[in-house]
Image (spheres, rainbow, N blue to C red):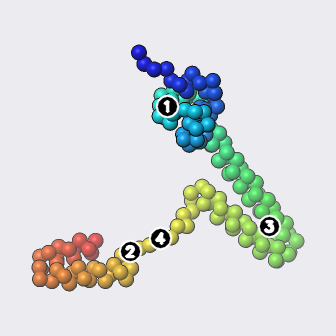
Amino acid sequence: MSRVCTICTHQERHAIDKAIVSGTPNRRIAAHYDLAETSLRRHAAEHLPVALVQAQEAEEVRQALDVVKQLRYVNGAALTVLRDARASGEAELVLRAIDRVMKQIELQAKLLGDLDDRPVVNVLVSPEWVALRAQIVQALAPYPAARQAVAEVLAC
């Protein structure tokens, strides 16, 4: 006869399920409710209500949409300020508004994944690689066939 899940029969099951779905570490949940971590893992894998997991995922999507909604609102406000500044002819205010709009566009692009500003390193043109490549080819000088084969591979 199989054992009964200690989480399913726990009087605080709803709170435990909520803590698991929200991403609270198993160790913290186990300590708080005096449970075994293995029981929590097994319960999460086998008994956690699908509806609860889906509700948590829906909440995360809703929060992400709220950020985009707020960003669009701020973008609209910045564009309104820019439009008003142009109409008033205040050059300094126009430039500050343009700067703000540019920052908003950059932030939006980063959040939506349209802009990747991580540095790109091309190791093929680095001085270290060029020197190493020359040393490899030079070391293979006594072996013409190997040197030719390696040179062809390095050229790609």
Residue 70's spot in the image, x, y percent?
A: 73, 52
Residue matched to label 1: 39
Measure the C-alpha gap from mark 1 to mark 3.
58 Å
Q: Which mark is residue 123?
A: 2
User: Which residue position is annotated with label 3?
Assistant: 82
C-alpha span from label 4 to label 3: 34 Å
- Mark 2: which amino acid? Val
Q: Is residue 20 above or below residue 128?
A: above
Q: Residue at x 21, y 81 (%)?
A: 137
Q: Secondary structure at mark 3?
A: helix
Q: Position of residue 138 (x, y in %)?
A: 20, 84
**Of label 4 and label 1, which has the lower sequence position?**
1
Within-10-Å neighbours for mark 3: few <14, some 14–19, many 20+: many
Secondary element under disc 1, as helix, strand or loop, is helix
The residue singled out by tag 4 in the image is: 120
Outermost residue to the top: 1
Nearest to the observer: residue 27 or residue 82: 27
